[in-house]
Image (spheres, rainbow, N blue to C red):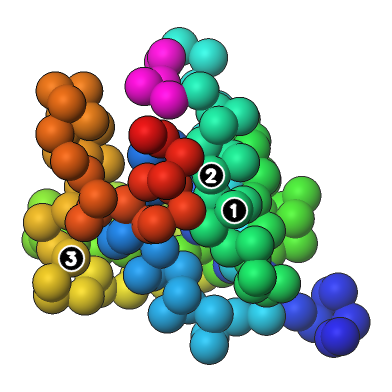
Amino acid sequence: MKNMSMQKIAIFPGSFDPFTVGHQDIVLRALSLFDKVIIAIGSNSDKKGFFEIDKRKQWIENTFIDEPKVEVDVYSGLTIEYCKNKNAKYLLRGLRTSSDFEYERAIAQMNKKMDASVESVFLLTSPELTAVSSTIVRDIIRHGGDAKDFLPEAIYNQIL
């Protein structure tokens, strides 16, 4: 195990409501780049999630139960402050579309201004997963559709 200060730790922040196969793909691909990936579920007291935050955390933990380089946590406040608290120098984000890029670029530039030591790292979504979004998956579930193809197996089996 590397010295904690030498570890390449990435924070993958999001609401993950729910965590999709697209999110899973980004994490699995990032594992070759980082010593640890912390999936950080943002807690927003002004916003009620579709799924309870504790359930989301448990589902994601179960998805990566056999992957020691993945940690799942819940946080509130500024993501850049959370990075400092976790000694993480990388923010991991997935990009599906050009509008995702514009949105993420603006956030990354603000984060860079607040803490120049944290780098934002963007991974493009695998082409076959570009259409998968939590919003769409939530709508499928909300209306009784089958979301099997869009959720990691460990999560799909627990939602039903």
Say above or below: 89 vs 135: below
User: Who comes first in sequence, dot 3 or dot 2?
Assistant: 2
Using the numbered discs, state the Cα–Cα distance from disc 1 to disc 2 in whole angstroms: 5 Å
Pointer 2 residue: 59
Q: Main secondary structure of the magenta part?
A: loop
Using the numbered discs, state the Cα–Cα distance from disc 3 to disc 2 in whole angstroms: 20 Å
Query: Which one is closest to the eye, mark 3 or mark 2?
Result: 2
- Magenta extent: 47-51
Of 123 and 101, nearer the camera is 123
Pointer 3 residue: 129
Disc 2 on helix, strand or loop?
helix
Disc 3 on helix, strand or loop?
helix
Q: Residue at x 59, y 40 (%)?
A: 57
Mark 2 packing: few (<14 Cα in 10 Å), some, or many (20+)?
many
Please state, as top left, top right, bottom left or bottom right, where the C terminus lies in the image: top left
Would you say residue 133 is visible in this rendering?
yes
Type of amino acid under label 2: Trp
Q: Is residue 36 left or right of residue 30?
A: right
Q: Quadrant of residue 43?
A: top right
Mark 3 packing: few (<14 Cα in 10 Å), some, or many (20+)?
some
Q: Residue at x 36, y 22 (%)?
A: 50
Magenta-colored stretch includes residue 142: no
Disc 1 on helix, strand or loop?
helix
User: Who comes first in sequence, dot 1 or dot 3?
Assistant: 1
The label shown at residue 62 is: 1
- Where does residue 107 sit, x and y in percent of width and height? 36, 49
Query: Which one is closest to the eye, mark 1 or mark 3?
Result: 1
Please state, as top left, top right, bottom left or bottom right, where the N terminus lies in the image: bottom right
Type of amino acid under label 1: Asn
- Where does residue 30 sit, x and y in percent of width and height? 48, 77
* Cβ atoms at labels 1 and 2 below 8 Å apart: yes
Type of amino acid under label 3: Leu
